[in-house]
Image: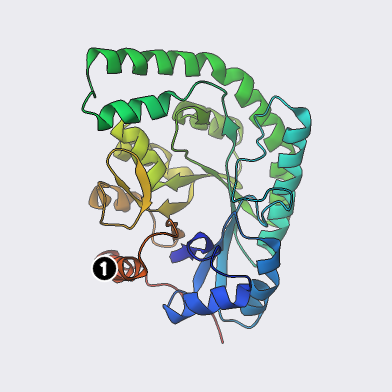
Amino acid sequence: MLAFSTCWLSHRYKEGELLADEMVFHNIRTLEISHGTKVSLLPGLMKAYDEGKIQVCGVHNFCPSPVDVMIDAPDAYEFSSHRENERERAIKLTLKSIDTAVRFGGKYLVVHLGTAPIKPYSKTLETMAKNGEMHSRKWVKVKHEFIRKRREMGPLYLDRVRAALDRILPYAEEHGVKLGLESRSHYEQVPTEEEMLTIFEEYDSPFAGYWHDFGHVQRKANLGLLDHRQWLASVADRLVGCHLHDVKWPAEDHCVPFQGTIDYPQLMPFVPDELPLVWELNPRRKTADILAAWEQWQSIYGGIPATPAS
């Protein structure tokens, strides 16, 4: 099922119904209500939903955007924080986001789980790769040091994530909303792929699933931290849905599909047609390029967006 994240247009509008109207004008009728969606946009989006103009497949945490955060910052509060009040704030905002999903008939909530406070090795490796130093002796040394330190730090931050999931998952189950635990773009972030598998072993619930972000995973694949195809295949049985965007090597993500390095023919066989495939694009991308890729995607892979009942 093809859908589109509101992140593409949410910064352009003060009225949610106008945002919905532009999506419908482009023949995009199935939306994910994204983080960064201000509370002021929700009444108009609700009106468009109630009138059958759009349907909503799911929501991205936090939604609406916290009123005390002035920019689009989905990681402003993290379950992994060393500050208890921030962890508590993250949990409460997530429960509120589940309520938002219920109001729109959404079936899932995409969730970021946190960050381990380690120096930004990913950025260092990406810069070195861009400068032609990939696989140099220095690059390999930095990469190995990065992996070792991140694994050492993992248990503490994974414990904090568990404490949050222990409170959030029962609420999600009660309200029929699946948690899509999202793959992240930086190995510093929680969970790593190893940690994701640990979570799934411990939380064997149909409401705790995996959200695959094509661009995030590709960025790590570009650094040799994983094999994109092998990873997606290994977690396909827990897949809730996907964010689709492309990556210009090595790390420019949220690009228009077909403009980067992602090998879709190798990956798409692992994504069932009925699962949401949500286009999550940088709002600075050109509308003409987006719409051309939207049509090209449908011609190759199908997945024509569902039309809401009138």
* Above or below 208: residue 147: above
Apparent side of residue 175 relative to residue 45 in the rendered image (left or right): right
Answer yes or no: is residue 103 visible.
no
Tell me what residue is drawn at x 48 percent, y 79 percent: 24
* Above or below 279: residue 51: below
Q: Quadrant of the N terminus?
A: bottom left
Q: Residues within 10 Å of mark 1 (few under 14, many from 20)?
A: some
Q: Amino acid at mark 1?
A: Gln
The colour scheme is: rainbow
**In which image quadrant can residue 162 be found?**
top right
**Relative image position of residue 141 (x, y in whole percent):** 32, 12
Tell me what residue is drawn at x 68 percent, y 48 percent: 69
Apparent side of residue 221 relative to residue 192 in the rendered image (left or right): left
**Relative image position of residue 149 (x, y in whole percent):** 48, 14
Apparent side of residue 213 relative to residue 95 in the rendered image (left or right): left
Element type at mark 1? helix
* Above or below 172: residue 53: below
Number of numbered discs visible in the structure rendering: 1
Q: Residue furthest bottom?
A: 310
Tell me what residue is drawn at x 65 percent, y 68 percent: 41
Tell me what residue is drawn at x 38 percent, y 25 percent: 124
Answer yes or no: is residue 262 visible.
yes
Q: Quadrant of the C terminus?
A: bottom right
**In which image quadrant can residue 200 be found?**
top right
Q: Which residue is mark 1?
A: 296
Apparent side of residue 127 relative to residue 213 in the rendered image (left or right): left
**Relative image position of residue 30 (x, y in whole percent):** 50, 70
* Above or below 30: residue 219: above
**Relative image position of residue 181 (x, y in whole percent):** 55, 42
